[in-house]
Image: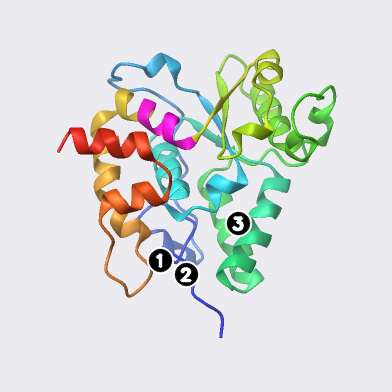
Amino acid sequence: MSAPLPDSTVLSSPDAASRLEAGRPGPRATSPHFAAPGAGAAALPGILVLDTCVLLSNVLRRVFLRLAEQGCFIPVWSERIGGEWRRNAARIWGVPADDIAAQWQALQQIFPQACQGDVSRHESGLQRSDPKDWHVIAAGRSAKGRHPGRTAAIVTRNTKDFNRTELRGYGLVLFEPDDLLVRFHAARPALMGALLRRIPAMAAPPGQEPADLESILKRERLFRLNRLYRSER
């Protein structure tokens, strides 16, 4: 028997599962804005490429997509990132491929600007980053072309595979999740505070009691965010 998909859905809004079951698309995400920003807002990207490793984490995926739903940035991925996610999610969680594909399609309805399609032509000129991750950079280059004037970044756990100098040459910034979430906390403290309180429920497998927030943040390697949370308790 297949294991249930953790969190039951890739979507981040609380009624997403019911919308998916009913075959109805969710509300489209709003355009990026920084309403009443706090310190550090200027350092935040208006476009954010979510690498596959970020999307595979139930916690990181839900937190970043919730920020996107609130208009903090335009989330970006490509057909190749989607293919990697579907393949790995089905393998890791033992979920039927058709179920994974349906959930991925539902995600496209909520974020219709996210998927950049085939971005292989935007790999031209890349040399200094790991070739297996050129497609991630290409997604960012594609999105910048579609949204001129917006700052753009990549968030990934595999920062060692990207050459920061090369990225800067294409107007892209590299973040690892912990650093970026701390920056969002500085800019949107009320929103991030609310998200932090929801993380235990987000991360709890179906039918199990939620773990404590500090344990989850440490497990997700969000050490700076955990220290910030502890300092504000």
> Which of the two discs, 3 and 1, labels the residue nearer the N terminus?
1
- Describe the element under mark 3 as helix, strand or loop: helix
Magenta-colored span: 177-183
> Which of the two discs, 2 and 3, labels the residue nearer the N terminus?
2
- Quarter residue 42 falls in: top left
Q: Mark 3 = which residue? A: 105
**Label 2 sits on what residue type?**
Glu
Q: Mark 1 = which residue? A: 18
Q: Position of residue 19 (x, y in %)?
A: 44, 62
- Describe the element under mark 1 as helix, strand or loop: helix
**Label 3 sits on what residue type?**
Gln
Q: Is residue 21 in the magenta section?
A: no
Which residue is at 45% across, 52% downward?
A: 26
Q: Position of residue 10 (x, y in %)?
A: 49, 57
Please identify the quadrant where the N terminus is shown.
bottom right
The foreground one among 66 and 6 is 6
Q: Position of residue 27 (x, y in %)?
A: 44, 47
Which residue is at 60% across, 33% downward?
A: 159
**Distance of mark 1 from mark 2, alpha carbons?**
5 Å
| The furthest residue to the left | 233
The color scheme shown is rainbow
Q: Is residue 136 above or below residue 209?
A: above
Q: Position of residue 25 (x, y in %)?
A: 50, 55
**Distance of mark 2 from mark 3, alpha carbons?**
13 Å
Drawn side of residue 57 relative to residue 230, left or right: right
**Label 1 sits on what residue type?**
Ser
